[in-house]
Amino acid sequence: MGTEIIEKKLNKLPDNLKLKVEGYIDALLIEYNITESSAKSTSFQVKAGFGGGKGIIGYMADDFDAPLEDFKDYM
């Protein structure tokens, strides 16, 4: 399949779906360990084991571990 066909199909999609396609392409590049100078590279590498995701999560709320009001009846 040529890139022209892919570009035509991609141009028909709304912006929110184009972002999903970009994410899928990034996932494929990572899965198959494809590194090209023209390919978009991610800013992290996932390592196996404890601490492997360090730096991936940019923000976590201060009350992350606090009980949720929705589950109050079950506690």
Image: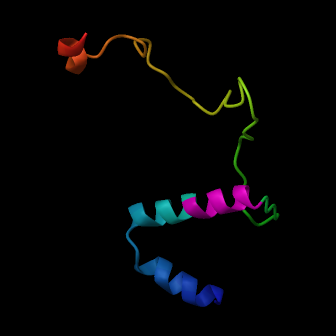
Residue shown at 57%/29% (left/top)? 58
- Which part of the image, by quadrant, shows the C terminus? top left
The magenta stretch spans residue 63: no
The picture quadrant where one finds residue 61 is top left
In this picture, residue 49 sits left or right of residue 10: right
Identify the residue shown where x is 73% and y is 64%: 39
Residue drawn at the location 52% of the way across and 25% of the way down = 59
x, y percent for residue 25: 61, 64
Question: Which colouring convention does the figure follow?
Answer: rainbow
- Residue 29 lies left or right of residue 65; in this view the side is right
- Residue 58 lies, with reference to residue 72, above or below; the image says below
Measured as percent of width and height from the top left, residue 37 is found at 82, 63
The region drawn magenta spans 24-32
**Quadrant placement of the N terminus:** bottom right
* Left or right: where 64 falls relative to 4: left
Magenta stretch: helix, strand or loop mostly: helix
Residue lying furthest left: 73
From the viewer's side, name the closer residue of 33 and 11: 33
Residue 52: x %, y % from top left: 72, 30
Q: Is residue 40 visible?
A: no
Q: Is residue 11 left or right of residue 6?
A: left
